[in-house]
Image (cartoon, grey):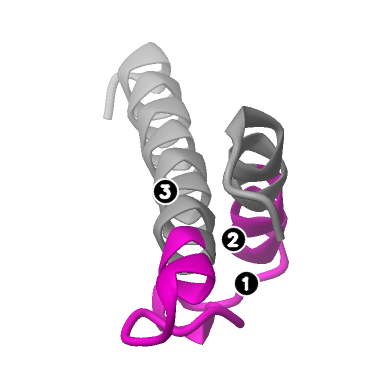
Amino acid sequence: MEMNRQAALALQQEGKAAFQAGDPADSSPYNRAGNAEQQFGNRYWTRGWSMARSAAEDAQEQAEASTGH
C-alpha cells in the first residue's frame, strides 16, 4: 500500500462502509501496532469509521429536533 492521499481516502471509505455494515470500530483489518503501512491503514480506516458515526449521530439529532423530541 502506498501512503498517499488516494490511499487515505480509500481507507476512509472502507471505514465508512464498515460502519454502515454494523462493524465495530475495533474491527479494523489493519494493525494499529504493526509496521508503518499497517498503522497508516488503521489510522485512516478508523477515521472513516468515526466520520460515518459522527454523520449518523448528527442526522439523528436533526431528526429528533425536527420532530420536537
Q: Nearer the viewer, residue 12 or 40?
A: 40
Q: Secondary structure at mark 2?
A: helix
Q: Position of residue 54 (x, y in %)?
A: 37, 39
Q: Is residue 17 magenta?
A: yes
SS class, disc 3? helix
Q: Horizontal placement of 69 versus 63: left or right? A: left
Q: Is label 3 in contact with label 1 (beta carbons under 8 Å)?
A: no
How far is disc 3 from disc 1 in space, using C-alphas?
Answer: 16 Å
Q: Foreground mark, 3 or 1? A: 3
Q: CA distance from mark 2 to mark 1?
A: 5 Å
Task: Locate residue 6, reporting x and y percent.
Answer: 71, 32
Q: Amino acid at mark 3?
A: Arg
In the structure shown, which secondary structural element does the residue marked by tag 1 occupy?
Answer: loop
Q: Nearer the viewer, mark 2 or mark 3?
A: 3
Q: Residue 19: which disc?
A: 2
Numbered tag placed on residue 47 in the rendering: 3
Q: Residue at x 68, y 51 (%)?
A: 2
Assign the C terminus to one quadrant of the image: top left
Region in magenta: 13-40
Q: Is residue 43 one of those drawn in magenta?
A: no
Crowdedness of circle 1 by 10 Å Cα count: few (<14), some, many (20+)?
A: few
Q: Residues within 10 Å of mark 3 (few under 14, many from 20)?
A: many
Q: Which mark is residue 22?
A: 1
